[in-house]
Amino acid sequence: MKVYPPPVPGPSVQWPVWVGSVPRLAAAFQPRTEVRKKAEVARSGDSEVVLSGPGGVGKSQLAASLARDLRDRERSGEAGLDVLVWAKATDPDQVITVYAEAAEQLQLPGLSSGDSAAAARVFLKWLETTGRPWLVVLDDITDPEAIEGWWPDGGAGNSWVLATTRRDDAQLSGQGRALIRLDLYTTEEARAYLQRRLTDAGHPHLHDPDKADELAEELGHLPLALGHAAAYLINKRRTMTAYLTLLRDTRSRLGDLLPSNADTEGYGRAVPAALISLDAVDEADSTRLARPLLHLASLMDPVGHPAALWTTPPALRHLSTTRPPQRRWLCRYHPPVSEEAVRSALECLRTYALIAQDTDTAPIRMHALTARAVRETIPADTLPAVARTAADAIFSLWPVLDHEDRELSAALRANTVHLEQRTYPVLWQPTTHPCISQVSSSLTDAGLYQQAIEYDQRALRRSNDIHGPDHPDTLRARHNLAVSYRSAGRVRVALDLGERVLADRERILGPDHPDTLEARHNLAFSYSDAGRVQEALDLGERVLADRERILGPDHPDTLAARNNLAVSYSDVGRVQEALDLGERVLADRERILGPDHPDTLAARHNLAVSHRDAGRVQVALDLIERVLADRERILGPDHPDTLRARNNLAISYSEVGRVRVALDLRERVLADYERILGPDHPATLRARHNLAISYGDAGRMQEALDLRERVLADYERILGPDHPATLDARHNLAFSHRDAGRVQEALDLRERVLADYERILGPDHPDTLRARNNLANSYDDAATAVQQPNTATPTTATDLPPSSTPPTQPL
């Protein structure tokens, strides 16, 4: 085989040789220092560099900056360039044309007129053998395989290949190539860009430092979008505040806010088109699922959504309808879509940087502007089907119990909220999608009570506007809000709303509808919270009878009614009945729901309280220690139910005389409640009340007195003067007065407490008996103080000693 010598440039070549059009640097160009350093390190190690990233992050701009640096560097030693070739690489023909032009400018021998491909090969051959320093930039590679044959052999010290692409295929990082990812502007880069761009344009007054970060955040720190937005501000003389208002208006079109006439840097396309150019995707997508998957993903939270959404049955059914139907016999049908086909389509979208995903099972992310641009391409008549499919997928993926996968539940909550906001009112028509209510119950289950209230208030407004006040979906929204109020400790508003919900459901749905039974059940809870314990008991007995009759004895709702009735028995002092029923509830729940179900833990917790009420303090202690360990393991250390178990364990420690342990635990519980639920939540008040008891037990009398006075004032302010918890606080404050030697104050307070207990709880309630016994002791104290005989009649319940037992917290 004959070997030809390498081509030698003609004698009249004027060095240096520049071929192709290197983009001019954008106004207020940011140098992207960290990525630039990586590129320089790779070049110094004889590695070619591929800048990879989604559309609009500035890959071509950074490549142009690197190329200009090399081109304009003073030529000394190996520095500087003799040949610089810039080739658009979206298509091989573009590369061939530029290479052929380079060969012609270099006057390489062997060129034949009209054969660009042959000339391009001559140029490639020259690059391999020349000793002159050169740089070839392949900008915007869309098909690495098609370009591979035209990729120069660089990395030889004086030569370098620099490429840009949206793709991140393994092929692009092989053969001595370093794949360097270019991402969005940092906060500092976005700030610097906006200030300099507006100032250099002569409009520094349009720059608002207080709004610049908001604007950058709203545009997702995307350099291309920030450039168009800045041009829009300059052209329209709009303030950042006014522009943000337009940008946040879901009715505004992205193409109007980032228009092509704001393309001051000559990119050639408006932002939406630059972000979602799908020609290459369509060509590479053999599944024909990439576009419909992109539509679904664009409705999700840009921060991330579970990849498993798109292999759920609802998603697969929808995707099968997005492809042309086939004929089977005399009818048309849509072949099923496989999970493998979905994964293949997602891989295609990842390859072209339309979505981002760390692994094939990791959450899928999409830039907020890309998602918005995609949403604007969804035909209006198909948006409802796409949105409800996404909601169906979310609902089907939701764990039966949130604690089984807390991260998944949190992600599904966030994506439901985002989906509802981006497609309103689709998820409300013709009926409210069940995932709307699922978010409410999930927030409550997670102990995020204030977030649940805010969410439910908004959902109730939405439902009322769309369906009207008497629609079952609106009743559901109102019921959810009442539950959230109750969970957050807003007792009075929860009670008022619960009474309304029950009245509305009885009127509209009938007395035996399951939703009506649910409202009656939760109203009994609110009566108990409000201290109306007899009303709670009466309603609880009715609810249990109704549920046993309608749902059967083993239905979970029936078990819940039985559990709550046991709590009501405890509240009215029917200790043995509470204990017997609590044992049955626990056995039923362990049998039907399993030992680790949160409802089973609640039953075990309540049974521990009943054992303590019955004086079986060691049994209670053993049981509540197990409950706390289970809740910490299953629900986490900061869940409100875990705090409740920890609080009641402290009570049990106090009752068995472990004073120091109880005090330490109660201080921790109070700090946790104040941090998680806030200072005025009823559970926080109980924790503060219990800590005062421990101070008294530990002999820290003044601290106990000060804290008990605060607790009583808080209870009277928040729960009212007649709430059982307020009576307990008043009762225990009397102990502190007695311990401080303030005998008459203790006596006066105990007389009031006994009268209140007899009026509210009845003469035979255990708390009333204790109050009567303690009042008799106060008469003894007063008689001793004035040295006169005591004429008080002691209580007949001699087995109930003076006690400062705090209120318990059953579930």
Image (cartoon, rainbow, N blue to C red):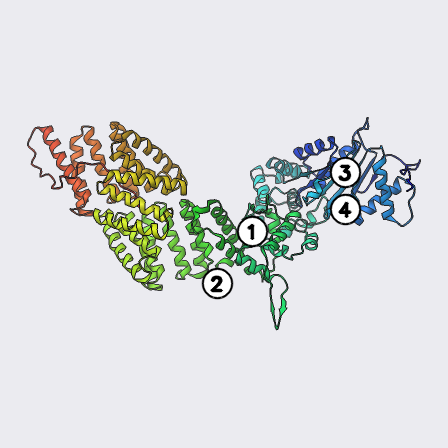
Q: Element under label 2?
A: loop
First reached walking from the N terminus: tag 2 or tag 4: 4
**What label does residue 507 carry, if any?**
none
Q: Element under label 4?
A: helix
**What label does residue 249 carry, if any?**
1
Q: Left or right of 248: which side holds 63?
A: right
Q: Left or right of 84: which side holds 442?
A: left
Question: Which percent across, then down, holds residue 257?
Answer: 63, 49
First reached walking from the N terminus: tag 2 or tag 1: 1
| Residue extending furthest toward the bottom | 330
Instruction: For label 4, count other residues whose C-alpha is less than 10 Å away and answer few (under 14), some (14-19) or many (20+).
Output: some
State the image quarter where residue 809 is shown.
top left
Give me the C-alpha separation between circle 2 and circle 4: 52 Å
What amino acid does circle 3 point to? Val
What amino acid does circle 1 point to? Asp
What amino acid does circle 4 point to? Ile
Residue 632, compared with residue 536, is above or below; it is: above
Q: Left or right of 418: which side holds 499?
A: left
Residue 623, compared with residue 458, is above or below; it is: above
Give me the C-alpha separation between circle 2 and circle 3: 58 Å
Quadrant containing the N terminus is: top right
Give me the C-alpha separation between circle 4 and circle 3: 13 Å
Give me the C-alpha separation between circle 1 and circle 4: 43 Å
Name the residue carrying label 3: 161
Name the foreground residue: 752 vs 259.
752
Residue 400, compared with residue 67, is above or below; it is: below
First reached walking from the N terminus: tag 1 or tag 4: 4
